[in-house]
Image (tube, rainbow, N blue to C red):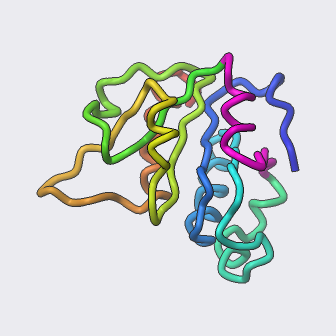
């Protein structure tokens, strides 16, 4: 499944080597319901026929086209004329202090390990969701929903 990005106008959610099928399925549903394109940078830590994935994705997989990249290098090369925004607990800037643009690609790391230092070094815009009481992180599907909603609100797409 691929989506023709040239006709899509709106935020894109990119997942770097996702490794938990239920989270990816929940993100597919969120993107389908809110009108965002999903991009997956492989390898995934599961197969798309995984029963845990199918249970959560339900029938949303048919309604949402996903663009797959075989590697981060291919993804990054394809994005050379687009802004990538990395969501990371290592960032110092809150997403609430950032001005999203309509065609941003918002990148989320692996649930188990984030993104490698190489990726951190290549991406200029890095944001975080502030946590109370020094908590480590939210579930990635919750994080995607928060950031996607804020992006859509700021760009008047919802």
Q: Is residue 30 visible?
A: yes
Q: Nearer the viewer, residue 120 or 82?
A: 120
x%, y% of residue 123?
49, 29
Above or below residue 96? Residue 25 is: below
Q: Nearer the viewer, residue 126 or 154?
A: 126
Q: Which residue appears at 72% of the width and 47% of the height?
A: 71
x%, y% of residue 46?
69, 72
Q: Which residue appears at 16% of the width and 53% of the height?
A: 132
Left or right: residue 144 versus residue 137 is right
Q: Nearer the viewer, residue 114 or 145?
A: 114
Q: Please tell me whether residue 92 belongs to the stretch shown in magenta.
A: no
x%, y% of residue 91?
31, 37
Q: Quadrant of the C terminus?
A: top right
Q: Is residue 148 visible?
A: no
Q: Residue furthest left?
A: 133
Range covered by the magenta-colored residues: 64-81
Q: Residue furthest bottom?
A: 51
Left or right: residue 10 versus residue 96 is right
Q: Quadrant of residue 105?
A: top right
Above or below residue 26? Residue 115 is: above
Q: Please tell me whether residue 75 belongs to the stretch shown in magenta.
A: yes
Q: Residue furthest front?
A: 118
Q: Which residue appears at 57% of the width and 70% of the height?
A: 20
Left or right: residue 26 versus residue 44 is left
> Number of labelled discs?
0
């Amino acid at each position: 499944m691929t989506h023709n990005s040239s006709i899509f106008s709106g935020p894109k959610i990119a997942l770097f080597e996702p490794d938990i099928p239920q989270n990816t399925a929940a993100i597919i549903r969120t993107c389908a319901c809110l009108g965002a394109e999903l991009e997956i940078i492989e390898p995934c830590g599961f197969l798309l026929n995984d029963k845990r994935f199918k249970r959560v994705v339900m029938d949303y997989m048919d309604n949402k086209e996903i663009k797959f990249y075989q590697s981060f290098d291919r993804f990054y090369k394809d994005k050379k004329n687009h802004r990538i925004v990395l969501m990371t607990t290592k960032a110092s800037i809150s997403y609430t202090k950032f001005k999203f643009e309509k065609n941003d690609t918002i990148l989320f790391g692996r649930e188990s390990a984030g993104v490698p230092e190489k990726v951190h070094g290549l991406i200029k815009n890095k944001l975080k969701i502030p946590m109370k009481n020094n908590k480590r992180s939210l579930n990635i599907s919750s994080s995607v929903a928060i950031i996607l909603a804020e992006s859509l609100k700021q760009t008047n797409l919802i």
